[in-house]
Image (spheres, rainbow, N blue to C red):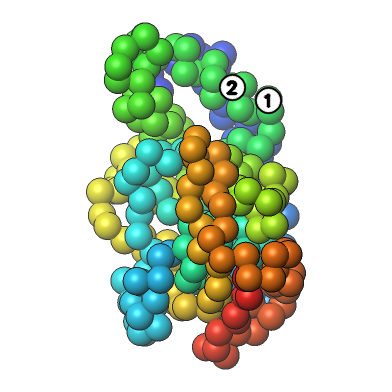
């Protein structure tokens, strides 16, 4: 545990450490479910705007970008497992697939309401919590706290349920699992680099015909084409794995 957790009451620190340890079985199962092949590395899926398509057709490339915006669990690489290959298609038409090695990763399963409650309890112990709730700086602090929480407990990956979806619920299911993956500059310090070395062999694999625009408020995203006016044909993870291995593309119609 990082020294950044020094202001956390000991009982709460221990409860969070216990929650991280208790998250391991779910993480192990997630990894197994998303392996490229038995005994192989797991596969992750990320969607990017179409303007980056050429980048990921070229090999090698720089890999996956570390997001710095006000994302759900702070800065990091946001991906899904290959078993839910369309879940984040609301964010871009180009689905890139990559391998990752989860050996030794510490996971915080925020899908568990009890774990989420521990984070909220930790939040209330922060000296700057007042800044986050009664000043104009809420947007900054509420996201910054999530970075600090991950740093304090050296969390490599947070598992969480989607907090946005397409308006019809055709692509994203609230029961899906999304991941926020940390890269480290040093123990307890998130990386300031642009690209993550944790994801390798990144390749353009899925092309989605649909385009989405955020609604107001941005809790959902509305498809712009809806050419068939029905859900897309379910995309088999087996098909995605095969396309990735053979360096071909899977096309998903609107």
> Where residue 129 sits in the image (x, y, percent)?
38, 13
Q: Is residue 14 above or below residue 218?
A: above
Nearer to us in this view, 156 or 225 = 225
Name the residue: 25% across, 48% down: 192
Quadrant of image for the C terminus: bottom right
146 sits to left or right of 248: left
Is the Cβ of the residue at disc 2 closer than 8 Å to that at disc 1? yes
Name the residue: 35% across, 60% down: 65
Q: Which of the 4 image quarters holds residue 237? A: bottom right
Res 148 visible: no
46 sits to left or right of 116: left
Within 10 Å of disc 2 (Cα), the crowding (few <14, some 14-19, many 20+) is: some
Q: Which residue lies under the disc numbered 2?
A: 118
Disc 2 is placed on an element classified as helix
Name the residue: 31% across, 61% down: 195
Q: Which residue lies under the disc numbered 1?
A: 114
């Amino acid at each position: 545990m990082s020294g950044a957790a020094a202001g956390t009451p000991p009982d709460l620190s221990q409860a969070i450490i216990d929650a991280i340890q208790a998250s391991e079985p779910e993480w192990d199962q997630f990894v197994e479910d998303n392996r490229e092949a038995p005994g192989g590395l797991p596969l992750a899926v990320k969607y990017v705007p179409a303007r980056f398509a050429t980048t990921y057709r070229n090999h090698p490339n720089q890999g996956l970008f570390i997001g710095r915006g006000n994302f759900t669990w702070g800065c990091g690489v946001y991906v899904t497992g290959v078993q839910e290959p369309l879940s984040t298609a609301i964010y871009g038409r180009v689905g890139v697939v990559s391998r990752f090695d989860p050996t030794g990763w510490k996971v915080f399963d925020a899908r568990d309401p009890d774990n989420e409650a521990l984070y909220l309890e930790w939040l209330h112990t922060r000296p700057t919590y007042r800044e986050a709730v009664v000043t104009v700086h809420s947007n900054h602090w509420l996201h910054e706290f999530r970075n600090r929480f991950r740093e304090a407990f050296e969390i490599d990956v947070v598992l969480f349920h989607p907090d946005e979806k397409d308006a019809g619920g055709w692509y994203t299911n609230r029961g899906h699992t999304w991941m926020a993956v940390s890269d480290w500059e040093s123990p307890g310090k998130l990386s300031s680099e642009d690209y993550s070395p944790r994801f390798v062999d990144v390749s353009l694999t899925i092309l989605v015909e649909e385009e989405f625009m955020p609604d107001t408020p941005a809790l959902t995203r509305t498809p712009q084409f809806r050419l068939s006016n029905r859900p897309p044909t379910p995309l088999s993870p087996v098909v995605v794995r095969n396309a990735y291995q053979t360096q071909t593309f899977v096309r998903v119609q609107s």
